[in-house]
Amino acid sequence: MRVGVVEVIEFMDIAAFLLQVYFDNLLQSIAPSMASGEMFDKAETLALRGKLIGPTCRLFFPNDPIKMVRAHGQYMYNEAGEKYLDCINNVAHVGHCHPDVVAAASKQMETINTNSRFLHDNLVAYAQRLAATLPPSLSVFYFVNSGSEANDLAVQLARRYTGNYDVMVMDNGYHGTTALLMDISPYKFKQADSSGKKDWVHVVPAPCTYRKIFEEDNIDLGKAYADEVKKQLGNLKASGKMIAAFLAESLQSCGGQVIPPEGYFQRVIEHVHQAGGVFIADEVQVGFGRVGSSFWAFQLQHGFVPDVVTMGKPMGNGHPLACVVTTAAIASSSSIEYFNTFGGNPVSCAVGLAVLDVLEKEELLKNAKIVGAHLIATLHKLQSRHPIIGDIRGTGLFIGVELVLDRETKEPATAEAQHVIVRLKDERVLLSTDGPARNVLKFKPPMCFTKADADFVTTKLEHILTDIENIGRHGTSDSGIESGIKEPDVSLPGIQENHHSGRKKQRRMADVGHQAKDDFSSINWISHDLASQPQVSNIVK
């Protein structure tokens, strides 16, 4: 009998679950301090952090932060050995502490680690492997240590190649933490303590198909949003300005899991080239197969090939590794030497090669496609029963669930979304919210995430949504929580005042006790906790 891919994945789910149970039981037999290797207890660690670490380096759940001491696969463990299902970590791409990645780093570290001014096979071997995943025109690589470094360098290359200075970006976009990137990230410069938008930065509407800016129905959204770019470029030309680059995340993550409509990037790049600029595709959060159907998210826009691609986060599975890849023409446009002390070192490249090997060996793109489709289908079933779910969007293991108070007005359910993630924390599930109003639940788990994991978190989510609905109707919940949901502080990064026009409706659910009283205003995105064993959901039956 021929065994299909789905059957193999389901068998692997069961095997992985049994193996995880075995390791959990083994660890429970070891004293927590021995298992974790802690130097301080939680209270001491927290006190030292408050004294020694910068105050803007914020914690998840500052009123009750989680102290994580180890991780494996899609699970993380606190100092007490309690297990959390990680639904948000797009950095531990092939799974936390993957043994193949750990072994590759250790083996190379024992041999040599130096800078790229010396010849070493790992650098060129890794570039060669990456080139095989990209269109032929993207053939010259610069290795760096973070997505911020990659995007910063990409803009530098664009400016040298074009001779122009200005940059165009999508609203709510986020590209990194250098001074340059903060200036071109609306997600950051729109915050209250920011100096605001610089006159050389130009912002176009995010191409959102749910909160579209157009009143007309049945229009080509890809063309309509691209026309907004064309219009702004025309206005700039009339004022004597030209852009060096149009920089866009292939899929907006911090902006609320926004999936551009088909045809958008294909048209935008034409307009950008006509205006004398280059197109930079930011794949830092969404590359390396997360979308399931392709290795790069920009490939979802059929036939589209950017001039520059940046990559980072998942590239090293937690090791600091990032890259810029561009065309030979752009790379040769500057004679200024570029040297990065740690970029492309032998250990980093060994780690990168191991990540590519694991993606291929464990067929994780196929897993992302199958498990992601299962998760989206299950979420749609929840949507049919819970009107608070306004939209579900995504592909592969990159999924957003937008919560609204009213499906007609699409008023953001910000307080409810924060309540959901804190309640999930109580259930040992790590999830987060994002988007301009912080009302989008975002799923971007390690690529080894299983159907059982998806069923587990959606079962918990349905119970919480039911609880919220009961609070709204009766003032109490199934779990006995007194009525009300804490309305978040408007100083929460990204929340705009115009998203709070419906406060009367939110106040009917005001002041839920429970752990929703965490200080949401002091974190950029929020995680949660999970129950110790996965279980099959009743939702999908």
Image (cartoon, grey):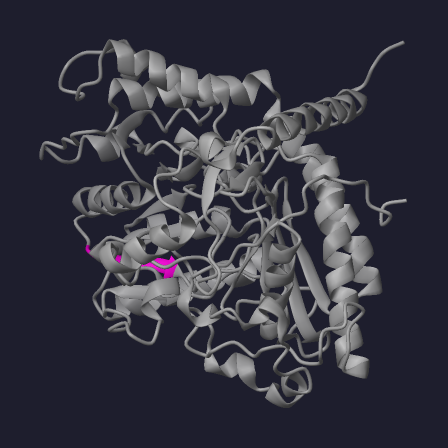
Residue 294 place in picture, x, y as percent? 57, 32
Determine if the magenta segment contains residue 507: no
Residue 7 place in picture, x, y as percent? 81, 22
Q: Is residue 184 above or below residue 109?
A: below
Between residues 269 and 528, which one lies in front from this camera angle?
Answer: 528
Q: Is residue 90 above or below residue 107?
A: below
Q: Is residue 433 left or right of residue 4?
A: left
Q: Is residue 58 left or right of residue 497?
A: left
State the residue lying farthest toward the bottom: 504
State the residue lying farthest toward the left: 336
Quadrant of the drawing holding the C terminus:
top right
Between residues 44 and 529, which one lies in front from this camera angle?
Answer: 44
Residue 340 place in picture, x, y as percent? 17, 32
Q: Is residue 212 visible?
A: no
Residue lying at 65% horizontally and 54% vertically, measured from the top left = 393
Residue lying at 70% horizontally and 36% vertically, measured from the top left = 371
Q: Is residue 421 left or right of residue 14?
A: left
Quarter of the rendering containing residue 257: bottom right
Quadrant of the drawing holding the N terminus:
top right
Count of numbered labels shown in the rendering? 0
- Start-end of magenta stretch: 165-169
Residue lying at 30% horizontally and 62% vertically, measured from the top left = 56
